[in-house]
Amino acid sequence: MVSGAVNIENKGKKAVGNLFTSYESSIPSGKNRMIRKATIVFILFLVFHSENKAQKVITEVNASEIVVGKAVIAVTGVRIIDGNGGAPIENGSVVVANGKIVDVGQADRVKIPAGAEKVDGKGMSLLPGFIDAHFHIDGVDELPGMFLQNGVTSIRDPGAWMETYENARKSGKPQPRMFLSGPHIDMFPPAYPNDAYVVRDAAEAVTQVNRAADQGSTMIKAYFRLPPSIIKEVCIAAHKRGIPVSAHLETTEAMEAIEAGLDGIEHVTSFGLTMAPKREGEKFRQNVLADNNARRNGRYEIWSQLDLKGKMADSLVKFLVKKKTFVDPTLGAFEYREENGKLDTVKLQGFNNMKAFTGIMKKGGVHVVLGSHSMIKYAEKGWAYQREMELFAESGLTNAQIIVASTMENARFFRISDKLGSIEKGKIADLVLVKGNPLDNISDARNVEKVMLNGVWVK
Ligand SMILES: [Zn+2]
């Protein structure tokens, strides 16, 4: 990787040198200096951008362990929901060969190759494999495999040592694509010591970013003790390696942190501080800085009082749109319900506001993506992803928007949208076949009939 980057850089420099020489010789001296300068700047811009592009290859750590399908498979007479958010194809067919989607369209237009293995999709919907932006294995080795059986073909763990996935990878059972990150970056005292790499300054943080990148990290997560000045250095280092950075904030003001270079935000609660009145916000912040656990109740208190129609909420949404920030609300991690006749009105109001703000962000044009948090209170083991889809529906997203957030939008967040995230010719064949129509009822995403990974039926 490193030597490749050096080569690209050298080639780039040589190319600039050649362009300069030929350009110099073709223009009479003293004439049109302005145009010459502008052209040189433009050439440098092109070279810089081509270098950046060449380095951006995000790959799951278990890529070599995923079998490539050899068979030609056709799913016929099925509703195709392609992940791009447009109208579905009601009576469509998809043909897969050698692990790729080779044709997709109206059933009467798609030619089914002789000898293809046929699956009748009548009464069912075919979707791109679900992508989970926020998965934690939490020592449950069978969990990634269970998610795959439930339609989640790609997972990203935003903060865990790579080793924590070894048992799952060696289990012999099919596993989803694992986009791992390495431990999240935090400062002392860390909220989750086992999943954190604790740094004392920006230099240590940058070293860790590069170490993670060397090990195949696909993103870096900044945790809530990092100040914007260190987030900035983390982002610069990660972007040099072609890796996006996301953050769990809460004690850091979101717009400052995004201005420092973040690509994404984990947890809707990361925005509480920004929208709270300054004095209350600072009180919450000091409480959490003094004791990590103060955030557990404190975030509901803050959220129960937010003015979501106020100026701060409005300017935050506009800022997120302008910055093209991906937002992964993980509502399931905060879901509150009345239990045994006991109702905590602060928690209920706090959670209702988290949902409401998720809807406001989507309506305002923010790039909302879906992360399940994998083990949550109100989902049976393995079903947190579908629960998050339902919570998005309760937040006011349309079912079509929820499916986009689950597939194509997440692919863009991961920087893998050239190969995954939608049902399109040429893309990798990661597919989910569900009974019913999730565009009518999002809970139909639970009716998983079949799952295809890399052109192979794994369920
Ligand atoms: Zn998490």
Image (tube, grey):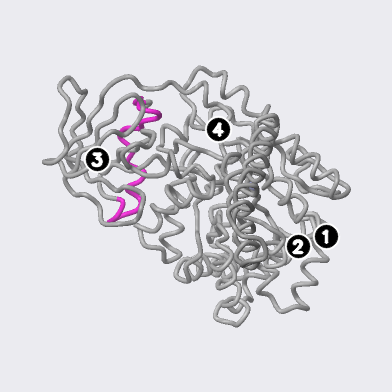
Q: Quadrant of the N terminus?
A: top right
Q: Amino acid at mark 3?
A: Val
Magenta range is 438-457
Q: Secondary structure at mark 3?
A: strand
Place residue 334 in its image quadrant: bottom right
Disc 4 target residue: 60
Report the residue marked by disc 1: 289
Where on the picture, by quarter, is residue 298? bottom right
The relative height of residue 456 versus residue 239 in the rendered view (above or below) is above
Which residue does the image show at 15% across and 22% down from the upper left?
A: 114
Question: Given contact means CB atoms under 8 Å apart, are the residues at marks 3 and 1 in contact?
Answer: no
Hey, what amino acid is under mark 1?
Leu
Residue 37 placement (x, y as % from top left) = 65, 62
- Give the distance between the C-alpha atoms of the residues marked 3 and 4, in whole angstroms: 26 Å
Residue 378 lies, with reference to residue 30, above or below; the image says above
Q: What is the distance, in whole Å, between disc 2 and disc 1 at their CAs? A: 7 Å
Residue 280 lies in quadrant: bottom right
